[in-house]
Image: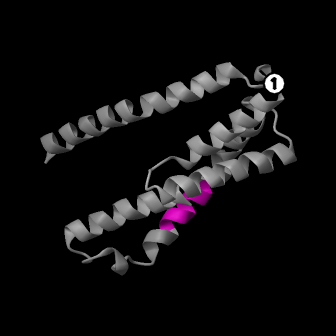
């Protein structure tokens, strides 16, 4: 859900900035269709890797533990939304899965995998920022 919504917001903001539409309520039908189609295609092509990492590589999750993790993640999202705190759905569910694994025993969590995920999250913002700056410089130089 929220990944497609973020992209829909960016596309719609670009349409407003270009003068194609005047506000978000005029979002063309193709915008959500394209965004949800892209998310579905990405999930079908590589989503299994994420599911495998989340369900087996961090810690082995049983169906009951999966329900507990999803419920905890959902509660976290509801509370943070009520408090107007922007959080990542991925981060909340990952934290919930780690919590479920840690309740069995701390060694049930594969901390090496967890550390790799944390590094990926930490590096995402500066790497994305650097790439955006590079693209801007290239486009500015060309145009």
Report the magenta residues as a range.
34-41
The picture quadrant where one finds residue 123 is top left
Residue 25 in picture, x, y percent from top left: 36, 79
Residue at x-position 71% and y-position 44%: 48
In the image, taking residue 40 as reference, residue 127 lies left or right, namely: left
Q: How many marks?
A: 1
The front one of 14 and 70 is: 70
Is-magenta flag for residue 132? Answer: no
Residue 29 in picture, x, y percent from top left: 45, 78
Residue 9 in picture, x, y percent from top left: 38, 63
In the image, taking residue 43 as reference, residue 102 lies left or right, namely: right
Is 12 drawn above or below residue 76 in the view shown?
Answer: below
The picture quadrant where one finds residue 95 is top right
Residue at x-position 76% and y-position 39%: 55
Can residue 74 be seen here? Answer: yes
Within-10-Å neighbours for mark 1: few <14, some 14–19, many 20+: few
> Label 1, on which residue?
105
In the image, taking residue 62 as reference, residue 137 lies left or right, namely: left
Can residue 59 be seen here? Answer: no
* SS at mark 1 in the image: loop
Is 90 drawn above or below residue 38 in the view shown?
Answer: above
Dominant secondary structure, magenta: helix
The front one of 81 and 31 is: 81
Is-magenta flag for residue 36? Answer: yes
The picture quadrant where one finds residue 18 is bottom left
Residue at x-position 75% and y-position 29%: 102
Residue 30 in picture, x, y percent from top left: 45, 74
């Amino acid at each position: 859900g929220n990944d497609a919504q973020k992209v829909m917001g960016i596309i719609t903001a670009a349409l407003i900035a270009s003068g194609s539409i005047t506000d978000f309520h005029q979002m063309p039908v193709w915008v959500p269709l394209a965004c949800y189609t892209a998310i579905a295609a990405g999930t079908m092509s590589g989503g299994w890797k994420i599911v495998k990492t989340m369900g087996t590589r961090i810690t082995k999750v049983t169906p009951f533990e999966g329900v507990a993790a999803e419920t905890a993640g959902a509660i976290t999202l509801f509370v943070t939304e009520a408090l107007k705190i922007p959080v990542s759905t991925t981060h909340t569910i990952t934290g919930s899965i780690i919590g479920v694994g840690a309740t069995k025993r701390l060694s049930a969590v594969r901390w090496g995998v967890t550390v790799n995920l944390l590094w990926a999250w930490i590096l995402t913002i500066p790497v994305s920022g650097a790439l955006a700056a590079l693209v801007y410089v290239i486009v500015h130089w060309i145009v």
